[in-house]
Image: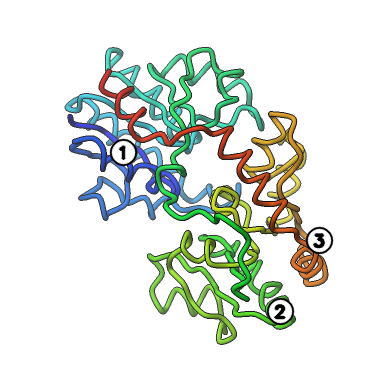
Amino acid sequence: MKLLVSALEASANSHLEPLLRVGEYEIEGIFDKKFGSPLYPSSDFSVMGFLDVLPKIMMAKRAINQMVQLSEKVDRVLLIDSPAFNLPLAKAIKKRFPKKEIIYYILPQVWAWKEKRVAKVERYCDKLASIMPFETRYYNRAVYVGNPLLDEIEVVKKEPSSAKKVAFLPGSRRSEIKSLMRVFKETAKEIDAKKVLVIPKSFDDKTIEEFYGDIEDFEISRDTHKTLCQSDFAFVCSGTATLEAALIGVPFVLVYKAKALDYWIAKRFVKLKYAGLANIILDFYNKEPLHKEFFQEDVNKNNLLNEYHKNDPKIFLQKAKQLRDILKYPSAKNLDRLIKK
């Protein structure tokens, strides 16, 4: 089957990979170059924050026009996350080719903000593949296919560890890495354990030097899941990695430092009690939060060290199991069936 794919984010490509393993697809569009020859590699669209989007607008408009042309010759269209790009793309494809089937995978998080997007998604997309079981409360036609992290995570803690190893995950974008590394370095100096810094596989030596600065106090790892499973504790930038840490079962604290304007906009419009996906999911099912969250000025050495010293890994593992039970099963095979149905 020939599939037009729109996967702009690194996480979207991670979630695309299990699907390509279980189904036989020829893909075109926007995705990571490791999957073939994209129209645009996903890295061209990497942005951080509301203001960073502005220079990409003209490129996005051009890409949408080109994607519409490509959609004519494919069997299906698969949109993954990134509603700011994928919803206008879905609208443009439907306007040009009304009968072209569009599947939206990893739906816009209307439970956080912009509930009006429900109408747009349901108008322009034929099949809605949800990765959060509670999203069927918001979308009339959503089908919960499972969570892709349960496809991707192959290592899970069975019991608390005492390896004297602590993981630091400052994210994957330049601005978030640079904003967190100063605090991470200060914190690491106060911890009597091996400090492991998780760096994206795609980063070369020049990028590492530019983004991270002096990291001689850290051991470097490119394997997120293995490092989290082997660590006693982790400091994790807000994002998909927090849910990965939760599902693996390593106690951690969520941290995030944003540009002042971005943080103000998020606080004004996002209607959630928590930022971490694990906490959000548990809250929807009236469960206690799994981990602590710190933002902006609260991301400091004292707060981070306090959480590191007082964490209870046994309680954490119990709550992590609750989370896995809620998510139930992986998504790749169910998504494959939905696309081909």
Residue 90, percent across and down?
39, 25
Mark closer to the chain start, 3 or 2:
2
* Tag 2 near tag 1, CB within 8 Å: no
Q: Which corner quadrant of the image does residue 286 belong to?
A: top right
Horizontal relation, residue 339 to residue 284: left or right: left
Q: Nearer the viewer, mark 2 or mark 1?
A: 2
Mark closer to the chain start, 1 or 3:
1
Residue for badge 1: 19
Residue type at tag 2:
Ile
Q: Which mark is residue 191?
A: 2
Q: Residue at x 43, y 36 (%)?
A: 330
Residue type at tag 1:
Leu
* Tag 1 near tag 3, CB within 8 Å: no
Residue for badge 3: 298
Residue 33, percent across and down?
27, 54
Mark 2 residue element: loop
Q: CA distance from mark 2 to mark 1?
A: 40 Å
Q: Quadrant of the N terminus?
A: top left
Q: Which mark is residue 308?
A: none
Q: Residue at x 69, y 52 (%)?
A: 316
Camera-side residue of 52 and 293: 293
Mark 3 residue element: helix
